[in-house]
Amino acid sequence: MDHLSGLDAAFLHLESPETPMHVGGLSIMELPPEYSGDFMQDVRTHITERMHMAPIFRRKLVNMPFDIANPIWVIDEDIDIDYHIRHVIVPPPATRNTVDRLVARLHSSLLDRSRPLWEMHVLDGLPVPSDLPEGTRYVGLYSKMHHAALDGMGGQVLMEAIMDVSAVPRAPSKRKRRRESIKGDNYGVAELTASGVMHNVSQSIKLTKNLPKLTMKAFDLLKPAKDPEGDSKAEKMNWLAPKTPLNATITNQRSFARFSIPYADSKKIAKLNNVSLNDVVMAISGEGMLRYFEDEDFRPDEPMLAAIPVSVRPEGNTELSNQVSMARMSLATMIKDPLERLQAIYASSNSVKSMLSDVKTVLPTDFPSMGAPWLVSSIAATLTRARVANSLPPFANVLISNVPGPNITLYFAGAKQISTYPVSIPYHGMGLNITLQSYNGWLDFGLISCQKLMPDIHELAQHMKDAHKELLALSVETFGEKVRDGN
């Protein structure tokens, strides 16, 4: 049986109506003036012919009896494609903000756990730039997949299955015939129970062997990081983050904003300052948040901290389970000078990398699940009902994730992909998620928050764009076009 790992299942158990645990994206597609087909039908056909090429399309959950262990994955042979792929007309007048509000609303609803955990929505009626040929049509593809079913490796498999490098879709690979011995979801109670018990026993043995070392490394992961060379810049990170208006209990309503910046400009900032591209992302995120808070007449009295997902996948591992941990780094928001702050972020980043190189080899992504379904679900419900996040200091102020993508033009069902904006997960105590993906010479940012905490999220997006523009100008003014030595 294909049991969910402990980490995969955690995304299920932590889910509630207020905190859906799916990730998604909004892709903007271009159809040329000569296109006269039915794009909705083209999408249905395109996905139907490729469903066997990506496991997420056909896997659904079966729960263990009495929740004695995490659920298992089985193959769904009766998929209702019209349920999973839907057509939505953007309410007129169609503007960028109208589209973003629609995406926020679609992202706020839970996926149906009785079916494979994915949906796609074809958005018609998008605004088209005025400089394009008359008759050009823009369509949006908003998709969401449960995080329990899709990690970075699964996302790569999915992209390879559905995206093409030309407007003419390649022929899908042949579907292999399934063996008659595969039972689908027709397991009996005794069979499921025995499998759940054996899975718990095997994971308990593995965890026991690594527990002493794991405990020490988990402590290292939580404590404030220090610069490997003793530089004081990175030592200012505290055990917990300062409280901000975004570190509170969230509702089930979402606000979403998106923007793009040239990859080359961000890379220039990184080279001129001898830092990484990710450090630049952290810097403009922190500066954007500071400016947003200033509009609200608030300023944190300690450096804000960012939570960053870190892959713990061993080299060569191709399993589709989630294999990721979470680290923290300082955004150095107490330093006013933008270039000095960028160097402090660089120091904090190096500190985190040094710590993770030793920690991630022992961090488990699977662990015993006896009682976990009801225990973790109870904790998630308590976080909502008791509004615990309103009173406790946060682990971090914001989650920031940088997803590398292809530097070529891709096509989907014959349509040219113009941009692809991530739509991720906010949670109680961390009500803002900033995720970006590089694509074809651009960095596409997707900002997602709780509508109650951040109804004006587009203002944060504008502040981040302004911060990036000013950081580029300041870097060029300070260092000139010459790249600093060392990078």
Image (cartoon, rainbow, N blue to C red):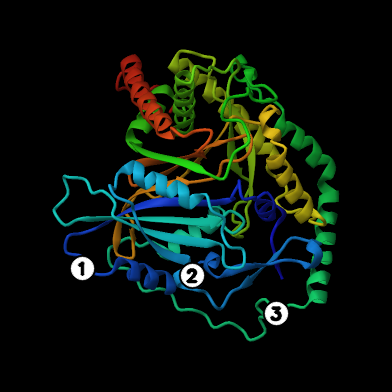
**Residue 226 in sight in this render:** yes
Of marks 2 and 1, which one's residue comes earlier in the chain?
Answer: 1
Residue 390 screen position, x and y as percent: 66, 30
Residue in view at x 51 percent, y 46 percent:
424
Label 1 belongs to which residue? Answer: 36
Q: Is mark 1 on a helix, strand or loop?
A: loop
Decide if residue 247 is on the left or right side of residue 97.
right
Q: Quadrant of residue 6?
A: bottom right
Q: In which quarter of the image is residue 236?
A: top right
Q: Quadrant of the N terminus?
A: bottom right
Of marks 3 and 2, which one's residue comes earlier in the chain?
Answer: 2
Residue, far left: 134
| C-alpha separation, residue under disc 2 versus residue under disc 1 | 28 Å
| Front residue of this view, candidates 326 and 20 | 20
Decide if residue 238 is on the left or right side of residue 265.
right
Q: Which mark is residue 186?
A: 3
Residue in view at x 29 percent, y 64 percent:
414
Residue in view at x 43 percent, y 73 percent:
48
Q: How crowded is mark 3: few (under 14 residues within 10 Å), some or many (20 or more)?
A: few
Instruction: Kindly identify the amino acid type of the residue bearing the numbered disc 2.
Output: Met
Q: What element carries label 2?
A: helix
In this rendering, the answer to whether 228 lies above or below 142 is above
Instruction: Kindly identify the amino acid type of the residue bearing the numbered disc 3.
Output: Asn
Instruction: Kindly identify the amino acid type of the residue bearing the numbered disc 1.
Output: Ser
Residue 27 screen position, x and y as percent: 37, 52
In this rendering, the answer to whether 148 lies above or below 383 is below
Label 2 belongs to which residue? Answer: 53
Q: How crowded is mark 2: few (under 14 residues within 10 Å), some or many (20 or more)?
A: many
Residue 132 screen position, x and y as percent: 17, 49
